[in-house]
Image (cartoon, helix red, strand yellow):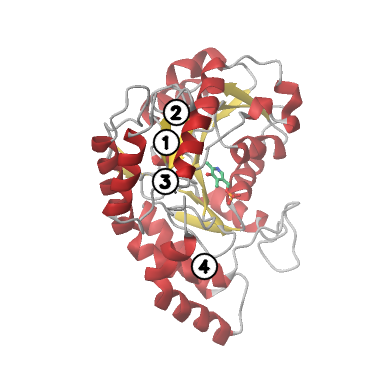
């Protein structure tokens, strides 16, 4: 059986480093916002080449806290791709803002930059590009529009640890970026964890307060903040795993190359292979008009898959007010996408088996 994602196996190469890190935290007697968090923030900021990294409790909070810090008028609009992950949309509404769902580019599944300008109104304040599946959004046109209309740009980099656009890494491509280190991400903790990267000094200071009740100084409260602190254990574990991120992303690329070269099936749409080196292949997402049959067939052949994602945000009960929207590109994507197993612990033989099995799926 090839499982979609076996996290024990993914973390096995890090076991000694993780145990050492955990031991160090236990011994320190300090468990929240301390030396380990400071050290990881420094290392991750260096990795992203940003001035600041602020560790927070999870990816949803990372995005929400930035949008709250920007303090736009209630009901201001934020432009986001209509096939984004639900957490990206939740961050907008948690901050009292209105998501404006824009159809993605059906080739890349990313924000379609040609559709941004028609969606801008006088209430638009920000664009939220989600680097979905590990590939960066096309940021140059986004920045051109952001400058022209004075909009902020918040990257959702939760699937893009190490991804590159031009000369820069994800996390350094906007005014701020939200990160998740949920265990299944390319850089994953052993629990919940998140961060924000930014080059904005004032924003960084504000976020350091906002994650800790709104206090920059103990018992002095400047903002109505949250409790969204990164703990020392998760920070130490992330710091232990970060040095291997590039080599693990390289392994993901090698596996993606095998899939791209090996899968031959007329009805199958493969992910774009034009940016293999810049993409970090968080997910390898194919499309098939009979997706559910293909998923069942693969399961019968011992291959686990997943769907990212089965229901578009505008069809979720939580967003019933968007139910009237017609977003045919998104709706088709959600009907057809299927994520194949792809993670650094997979062997060539396993990938070859997945390829052969897919190629044997009868039309
Ligand atoms: C995982 C993820 C999030 C949310 O992160 P959590 O840590 O689970 O809150 C947000 N956006 C995207 C694109 C994600 O993949």
Point out residue 335 in the picture as x, y percentages from the top left corner.
54, 25
The CA span between labels 2 and 1 is 10 Å
Checking the image for residue 235, the label placed there is 4
Residue drawn at point x = 71 percent, y = 56 percent: 214
> In this rendering, which labeled residue sits more in front, label 4 or label 2?
2
Reading the image, the residue beneath label 2 is 109
Q: Nearer the viewer, residue 73 or 177?
A: 177
The mark that comes first in sequence, 2 or 1, is 2
Compared across the picture, whether 60 is left or right of 227 comes to left
Checking the image for residue 282, the label placed there is 3
Q: Quadrant of residue 278?
A: top left
Image quadrant holding the N terminus, namely: bottom left
Considering only vertical position in the picture, is 118 above or below 298?
A: above
The CA span between labels 1 and 3 is 9 Å
The CA span between labels 4 and 2 is 31 Å
Point out residue 186 in the picture as x, y percentages from the top left corner.
43, 53
């Amino acid at each position: 059986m090839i499982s979609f994602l076996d996290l024990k196996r993914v973390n096995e190469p890090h076991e000694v480093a993780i145990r050492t890190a955990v031991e160090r935290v236990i011994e320190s007697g300090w468990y929240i916002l301390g030396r380990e968090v400071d050290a990881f923030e420094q290392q991750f900021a260096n990795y992203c080449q940003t001035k600041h990294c602020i560790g927070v409790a999870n990816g949803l909070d990372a995005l929400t806290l930035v949008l709250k810090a920007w303090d736009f008028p209630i009901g201001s609009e934020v432009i986001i791709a209509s096939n984004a992950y639900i957490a990206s949309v939740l961050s907008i509404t948690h901050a009292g803002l209105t998501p404006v769902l824009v159809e993605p580019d059906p080739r890349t599944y990313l924000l379609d930059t040609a559709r941004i300008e028609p969606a801008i109104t006088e209430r638009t304040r920000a664009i939220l590009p989600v680097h979905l599946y590990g590939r960066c959004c096309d940021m140059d046109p986004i920045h051109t529009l952001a400058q022209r209309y004075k909009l902020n740009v918040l990257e959702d980099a939760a699937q893009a640890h190490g991804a590159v656009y031009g000369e820069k890494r994800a996390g350094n491509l906007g005014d701020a970026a939200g990160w998740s280190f949920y265990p299944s991400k390319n850089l994953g903790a052993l629990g919940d964890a998140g961060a924000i990267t930014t080059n904005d000094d004032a924003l960084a200071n504000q976020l350091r307060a906002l994650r800790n009740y709104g206090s920059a100084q103990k018992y002095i409260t400047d903002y109505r903040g949250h409790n969204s602190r990164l703990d020392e254990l998760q920070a130490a574990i992330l710091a232990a795993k970060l040095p291997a991120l590039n080599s693990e992303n390289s392994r993901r690329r090698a596996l993606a190359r095998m899939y791209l070269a090996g899968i031959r099936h007329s009805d199958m749409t493969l992910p774009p292979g034009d940016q293999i080196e810049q993409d970090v292949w968080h997910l390898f997402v194919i499309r098939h008009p009979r997706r559910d049959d293909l998923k069942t067939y693969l399961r019968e052949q011992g291959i686990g898959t997943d769907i990212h994602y089965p229901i578009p945000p505008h069809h979720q009960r939580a967003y019933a007010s968007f139910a009237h929207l017609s977003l045919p590109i998104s709706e088709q994507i959600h009907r057809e996408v299927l994520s194949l197993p792809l993670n650094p612990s997979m062997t060539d033989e396993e990938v070859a088996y997945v390829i052969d099995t897919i190629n044997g799926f009868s039309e």
